[in-house]
Amino acid sequence: MRYLSTALAGAAATALLVTGCGAPPASPGAASSTGESQYQRSVAFAGCMRSHGEPSFPDPQPNGGFMVHNINPNSPQYQAAAKACAKLRGPGMSPAQRNQALAQLLKYSACMRAHGVPDFPDPTEQDGGVGIQISTSTRQGANGSTTTGIDPNSPQFKAAQQACRSLMPQSGGAS
């Protein structure tokens, strides 16, 4: 992951799109073998992450996946929270589910690049699932702040995301 150099004076922002924080059910509300839905496990996981030092960790998407912004997944704080909350994540994705999500997210990444986000990265396997990690940083320039890397709040990014939305895996991630 690309991070700030010492020359940057602003805040770093990272976005992490995570799919499959546990074995995804056949449908968003389907129950797992433990009687809990993926969404319920994800709600518990999000609450645990917040209570263990990641106060801006988001609520899950309806399918149980997360769209995480402005959190450094490599920070000691995040790593400690993830370790403390690991038991709530569920068993993770099966190899077949990971391969399917990876193939789908590769299509999504290619679509994002084709729709005007040329540096959009390919997905990687992360934390028992598959995700796309995006790095941005903001620094104070002579004429105001300047964002480098990919800006998930830019109109170009949002338009590409809308155009590519149908390529997101249905068993995890954000819509």
Image (cartoon, rainbow, N blue to C red):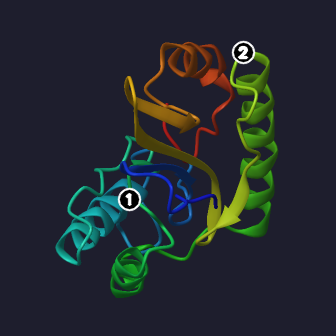
Q: Which mark is residue 138?
A: none
| Percent of width and height locating residue 155 | 49, 13
| Percent of width and height locating residue 145 | 38, 31
- Is there any visible trace of residue 15 in the rendered image? yes
User: Is residue 68 positioned above or below 53 on the image?
Assistant: above
At 28% from the left and 70% from the top, the residue drawn is: 49
Q: Quadrant of the N terminus?
A: bottom right
**In the image: residue 57, left or right of residue 120:** left
In depth, the one of 161 and 141 nearer the eye is 141
Q: Are marks 2 and 1 in contact (CB under 8 Å)?
A: no
**In the image: residue 54, left or right of residue 76:** left
Q: Residues within 10 Å of mark 1 (few under 14, many from 20)?
A: many
Q: Which residue is mark 2?
A: 115
The quadrant holding residue 129 is: bottom right
- Is there any visible trace of residue 64 in the rendered image? no
At 51% from the left and 72% from the top, the residue drawn is: 74
In depth, the one of 60 and 120 nearer the eye is 120
Q: Residues within 10 Å of mark 2 (few under 14, many from 20)?
A: some
In depth, the one of 88 and 10 nearer the eye is 10
| Percent of width and height locating residue 107 | 80, 33
At 39% from the left and 46% from the top, the residue drawn is: 29
User: Is residue 95 positioned above or below 9 on the image?
Assistant: below
| Percent of width and height locating residue 72 | 44, 63
Separation of marks 2 and 1 at Cα, in angstroms: 35 Å
The quadrant holding residue 51 is: bottom left
User: Is residue 113 positioned above or below 68 on the image?
Assistant: above
Amino acid type of disc 2? His
Which numbered disc flags the more N-terminal residue, 2 or 1?
A: 1
Q: Which mark is residue 37?
A: 1
